[in-house]
Amino acid sequence: MKPRLAPAATVTGRVGENVPRPDGVLKVQGGFPYSSDLQVDRMLWGATVRSPHPYARILSIDTSEALAAPGVRAVLTHEDVPGKRVYGLEIPDQPVLAFDVVRYWGEAVALVAADHPELARRAAQKVHVQYQVLAPLTDPEQALLADAPRLHPDGNVTRHVKIRHGNQDARAEVVVTGEYEVGMQDQAPLGPESGLAVPDEEGGVDLFIATQWLHVDREQLAGVLGLPPDRVRLTMAGIGGAFGAREDLSMQAHACMLALRSGRPVKISYSRPESFVGHVHRHPGRLRYEHGANRDGKLVYVRARIVLDGGAYASSSTAVIANASCFAVGPYRCPNATIDGWVVYTNNPPCGAMRGFGSVQNCYAHEAQMDKLAEALGMDPVELRTRNALETGSQMITGQVIDGPVPVAELLRRIKERPLPAASDPGSLDLTTQPGGVSNTTHGESVRRGVGYAVGFKNVGYSEGFNDYSTARVKLSVVGGRPRVEVHTAAAEVGQGLVTVQAQIAGTELGVTDVVVLNADTRVGSSGSSSASRQTYITGGAVKAACDAVRRRVLALAELELGRKTGKTDGLRLERDSVVSADGREIVSLTTLLGDEVIEETHEFRPRQTTRLDPETGQANAHVQYAFAAHRAVVDVDTELGLVKVVELATAQDVGKAINPQAVEGQLEGGAAQGLGLAVMEEIQLKDGVIRNASFTDYLLPTILDMPPLRMDVLELGDPHSPYGLKGVGEPPTISSGPAIVAAIRAATGRPITRVPVRPHDIVET
Amino acid sequence: MKVSCSVNGQVLVADDVWEGESLLYVLRERFGLYGSKNACEQGECGSCSVYLDGVLVCACLVLGGQVNGREILTVEGLSHRTALHPVQTAFVEAGAVQCGFCTPGLVVAAHDLLRRVPDPTEAQIREALAGNICRCTGYAKIIDAVQLAAGRMSG
């Protein structure tokens, strides 16, 4: 029994072209099946009982009333977990269903499956859990204290990253210090966490799911369900955005457990309030910095103490704090650095991956520091950045020497030289151009303009020795009298356009018009996650490698058919659905050459190896590739009311090679919007560990009225190590866009602004 | 209760609709029309935008029981078999679709705008689509798509 999934569409196009996405036609018609749209006969609906306390001891759980409720088919607690009771991406510390204690508000405690979603929700309210409420530990600084209550057996420190680079006692002529705070951001993908689990006849299960990484879900699920991995089969359903929120398990294990227990297909689809507790968030951070520089503006040292609040469970915290520490200085040459990055457990909601992954938090701090330093030196802030900009061959504070293009100064030059937008027109009747918009709070009175700059960078791909690879299966055959390429990977199309990119690569490498990308599932090897801006690089590389192997076989066949001797290929190529000679003449069509023959190759692709950070000094070749972007922001601020209108954003980014230029622009635009959100709008507001704004009414996302025009400079400088010279594109736009906006607000108001998102009372002097 | 209404020109009937079910639930789970999306179910994101008697509404804010005897047009009703509406074609071509979860609602809202204002300014586009949240695109290509569709529909 399978739900309807999106059919594989045929794509035609080459690397570098604006090939439209094959799922676009279904998506505009409302016919694309997302994970929340799945249905099959006899399907039950699952609901989750969640903790109303951020920290409490579970004294008892009584499921009898829920079990007796109408339409209820199963009620499960931790006692019903068939295998491992805990899971986690890096550290298995998170209970599938809470036992002994709950560590955050909204933690899953019990499950219900019923005939109708409302019956399931009502029955969930009839699961009676007795708690002994404990005082929640919600301040990450307090979590670090020796006498703090220990939330996990190994204490509250999930990881402490130490970077000791150069002279630890360096002194400088000019010193600036600052403390900065970043609020908790939500990924807020529009598609809710959802999926459908279908039990088979032999105790195994099929899960149709929206996830960023099928195989790591399967690995965790097999453990939780106590099943061998081959009896847990995952198939990708339509994904309504991700941005990091779908890296950890949410409802996957719960749906499978309910399906296996009830013997019926079970669907779980979270509501928006539930989604806010159903996935991890961006780590809030407190960052204390000291920058020392010579009078000529050259950085002498940076000392930083970064504390990230990891919340109740580890998720990917250990990797996030590594990024926050490795890139703490920003894309600048700095001979001496002392960085201490901490990520700790608290009773706040768990934090993990979100677009930018550690580089977003520190960029607010290092860019504010650079502006502060420029002011102390009486220097133009862009000039100061340019003087210290990383270049090809520069050494990072981790000791790694950066190779390939490092266009930090060039990106800054481009955003600086771009003409500024016209001054706002106070007589304009279009209120949407004013801070406060159609609330009609100003017609230009007390509105001041500011311009700010920021530049940021981060790693592409997994780091610190992690075995980063992807698998692709490519099949070439003749279908209906035409050659056709089928590409099969497990990589997640989260909206970024990966399906199109895979098809473009196969079309380019094999010169075939019709390329079909099969739906992702676990029948093929792992592709790793759609995260860390890595998928076009790594899965793109795997598709290219598999195509290379297919091409070699086709050309060998052509030589054989043509009676040539091996080795005398004389530049035969695949183009226009044919084998062509070096000068482009058609030798034989693939249809004729292949006949009934099917050529299939499966290949893994690995980028170059990285190494783990030294635990005492943080020195290592820890990262595969670095991606850079810079932003300029122009804002109008109502200085009486503290309202901000972002007038324009400009960006420059090196993408190495734009495989699909239109999709690249989409990443730059969408990423900048999420940066704007964190800068001036978006924050999960917590009080004593409880989320106060778990809805789209109260958690403010940028709308089309909030997002200004984005002027773009896309550079294609070509990385010598990656397929086609490409660089990861997705995350850099989210890193420096927000810090540029905050710099512009400082410039407009003269206020220090040390916290994001910037609130009206941070701007208005009280 | 029993609910009978016209959906995309066809009379559909749902039996045993619970009083608390929204029009969105009825469309999706009773009629199998999953195009209208369930992103916030609070009227904030516009992903479930449909026409009710010709007026743009969030289907999540209308009770199923309210639509008895009324006419509904959903995103599924905008195209005729394989022939996309110009707004739909423009969204695909302009790159206005990424994950696409907001797309059905935006397509319906843009359709409504162009029905009322055939040649909208950028400010009018922004105002008309301010009730639709998109988390992927940053909206630039959505504005491009509406302008592209407007040009084609008037030309």
Image (cartoon, helix red, strand yellow):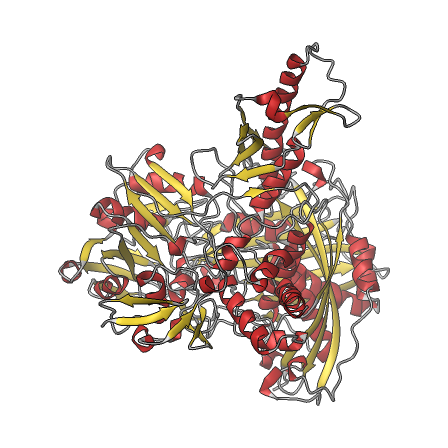
Q: Is residue A281 left or right of residue A454?
A: left
Q: Position of residue A634 (x, y in %)?
A: 73, 72
Q: Quadrant of the N terminus of chain A?
A: top left
Residue A173 visible, this angle: no
Residue A170 lies, with reference to residue A741, above or below; the image says above
**Residue name at image x 69 percent, y 87 percent:** A429
Q: Is residue A69 left or right of residue B11?
A: left
In the image, A720 versus A306, the foreground residue is A720
Residue A127 lies, with reference to residue B69, above or below; the image says above
Which image quadrant for residue B111?
Answer: bottom right
Q: Position of residue A638 (x, y in %)?
A: 67, 84
In the image, A76 versus A705, the foreground residue is A705
Q: Quadrant of the C terminus of chain A?
A: bottom right
Q: Position of residue A245 (x, y in %)?
A: 48, 55
Q: Is residue A45 left or right of residue B130?
A: left
Q: How many marks?
A: 0
- Farthest residue, direction right: A296
Residue A358 visible, this angle: yes
In the image, A214 versus A392, the foreground residue is A214
Which image quadrant for residue A745?
Answer: bottom right
Which image quadrant for residue B25?
Answer: bottom left
Q: Position of residue B9 (x, y in %)?
A: 40, 67
In the image, A329 versus B111, the foreground residue is B111
